[in-house]
Image (cartoon, helix red, strand yellow):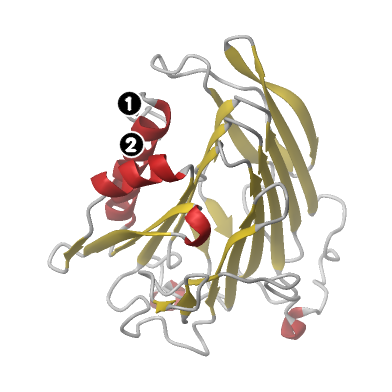
Amino acid sequence: MAAANGQGTPSRPLGGAAVVGARTGSVFAEPAAFRDEPAQMRSGAVGKNGFLRLGFERRGACTVLAELDRRIPCLVQRALYPEAALPDFAWVFMITTTGCVLQGDRLTLKLQLGPGARAHVTTQAATKIHSMDANYAAQTQAIRLEDGAYLEFLPEPLIPHRGARFLSETTIELSETATLLYGEILLPGRKHHRPDECFGAALLQLAMTATRPDGRLLFTERLLLEPARRSLRQTGVMGDFDVLGNAVVLTPPDVAERIEARTEAAVDLADGVACGACRLPNDAGLIFKVLGREAAQVRAAMRRFWAIVRAEATGAPLSAPFFWR
């Protein structure tokens, strides 16, 4: 999977994800091979067509969850303020009442931060994508950050089960003075459950596009995995690694420079972990990738990068891990 930096210079980010500088229409189309309807309940039916809209605003010295709209199976209860170093920082946990993603699910998230708002959005648990014998599951996420806003969007890991088919498209619009840390961790499946669960998904497609409010394109990233057609064990893709961590920080250039100066690349084959960061095109920020044999290694590397971003973007340290994480 090749990549480009927006000026036509080829590169290969760690993990094989593609980053391109141009986009026409959607970066993925509906998979033609998986249009059959589930026998149990048609795709997008009531209970399978989830919607969540979150709107954060700065009010005085605090960020509040000012707008909330939801449709099952998506749920959010209330904003929490657990960090002593950032008492204005709103934490919100996204919940799914079904506990997993099933065939035919269509999920939509709209997330907006007003001027100066600061929030951390995550999930209550890992996102498990169950095995599928018909259709597919899809998620659409739209994130918008206004002047001076700061968002950490760090859901728990994605776990695709054997035969899963999952498409995700994320569009981001942010001001030049805003900062977004977007992170995701992709597990190979339930690799300790049975041998064919490891990289046993049928289709995984994760796409992201970022623009300025005036429509200027910053970058597009697309990760396409079809293990049955192309082995992920190839050198330059996953090789001997099992877990992929992907973090994108969109931030002003001076902040990006400080983050990059503190972020070290490392390859430790004995320990089974490799990580590194590089600049995104159009002064958008940085992309940081981690490969590991186990989830704990990737989570630790992602957390170290998160701590650097938090310190450089807000001036506050990252709190010690909470007992629920």
Label 2 Cα crowd, 10 Å radius (few <14 / some 14-19 / many 20+) = some
Q: Which residue is mark 1?
A: 317
Camera-nearest residue between 257 and 49: 257
**Distance CA(mark 2)–CA(mark 1):** 7 Å
Q: Are marks 2 and 1 in contact (CB under 8 Å)?
A: yes
Q: Is 303 placed left or right of 186 in the picture? A: left
Along the polypeptide, which appears first: circle 2 or circle 1?
2
Label 1 Cα crowd, 10 Å radius (few <14 / some 14-19 / many 20+) = some
Camera-nearest residue between 33 and 208: 208
Q: Is 251 placed left or right of 105 in the picture? A: left
Quarter of the image for the C terminus: give it: top left
Secondary structure category for the residue under label 1: loop
The reply to whether residue 124 is in sight is no
Measured along the vertical axis of the image, is residue 5 above or below residue 301? below
**Residue farthest toward the bottom in the current orientation of the protein:** 229
Measured along the vertical axis of the image, is residue 169 above or below residue 285? below
**Which kind of residue does numbered mark 2 sit on?**
Ala
Residue at figure coordinates x 56%, y 20% from the top left: 80
- Where is residue 103? Give x, y as percent: 71, 66
Measured along the vertical axis of the image, is residue 137 above or below residue 89? below
**Residue farthest toward the top in the current orientation of the protein:** 60
Instruction: Kindly indicate the quadrant of the structure image that contains residue 96.
Output: top right
Q: Which residue is mark 2?
A: 307
**Which kind of residue does numbered mark 1 sit on?**
Pro
Measured along the vertical axis of the image, is residue 49 above or below residue 274? above
- Where is residue 30? Give x, y as percent: 76, 75
- Where is residue 301? Give x, y as percent: 29, 50
